[in-house]
Amino acid sequence: MQFLVLGPLQLTDGDRQTPVSAPRLQQLIALLLMARGSSLPLTALSAELWPDGPPSTADTTIRTYVHELRKLLPGDSDRLSTGGSGYRLAVQREDVDAFVFEGLTESARTLLRGGPEPDRLHHAAGLLRQALALWRGHPFAGVPTGPQLDLHLAALNAKWLRAAQLRIHMDLLLGCHRDLIGELKGLVREFPLDGQFLAQLMVALHRCGRRGEALRAYRQHQRILHAELGAAPAPRLRRLRGRILSEQCSAPVDALLC
């Protein structure tokens, strides 16, 4: 069985999808999955499911959810085991899309540590595209979250951000500036405070002869930072703007984005 968390929670077995309708049952499944095969004690499960304080029936309710989860795993119920005062859901990396995503991104980074040769860049960019394609929306979409799942959610979103930025960086190194502009404009709108996407957009625009647009994007970022945070653009963005203004952008992409 496959467990998909990079979007709405889904349990699939081949072409068959097993619906999970109860929100707290979804939450329990997500918690057990993100424990990566470790046992979670009842106290930790209760604190997550009822962050404002568990009811007196919390342990009984959790056992009911565990019973319901076993019924969702026909022929595979031995994945779910009881140990001490907690529960453990045994999964392999390939069973959970979030773990597959992490494995692909790590493989891409390992490949890049061998050097920036074009073949390596193409291969790494392909692995990152494959990883990013696993995302169907926000992780755990529609699943109630407590303190633990909120931490997992933040960590997954941060990993997506780094993977997306690295994949775009690979494409810039490969000279795909023109193809990236539309995507980068959308990412800058979605993440207006993120300087990396802006820097990548400015480089892509300038390399396509659109110097004025690159500088306008910088000024828009400058206005947003000042209005929302009372801050100025990062030093590396100011350096990049200076290079664009002085037409000194013939340096390699790596040098421009540092």
Image: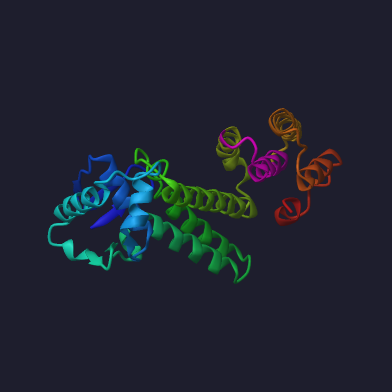
Which residue is outermost to the front?
Answer: 56
Which residue is outermost to the bottom?
Answer: 114
Does residue 5 appear in this view? no
Q: Is residue 245 left or right of residue 19?
A: right
Q: Which residues are magenta?
A: 190-207
77 is higher (above) or lower (below) than 151: below
x, y (%) of residue 131? 44, 54
Does residue 90 appear in this view? yes
x, y (%) of residue 114? 60, 72
Residue pictured at 84% horizontal, 38% vertical: 245
Q: Nearer the viewer, residue 222 or 87?
A: 87
x, y (%) of residue 223? 73, 28
Magenta: predominant secondary structure element?
helix
- Magenta region includes residue 192: yes
Residue pictured at 37% horizontal, 40% vertical: 141
Q: Nearer the viewer, residue 57 or 256?
A: 57
- Magenta region includes residue 20: no
Residue pictured at 60% horizontal, 38% vertical: 181
Q: Is residue 40 left or right of residue 109?
A: left
Q: Nearer the viewer, residue 11 or 67?
A: 67
x, y (%) of residue 152? 45, 52
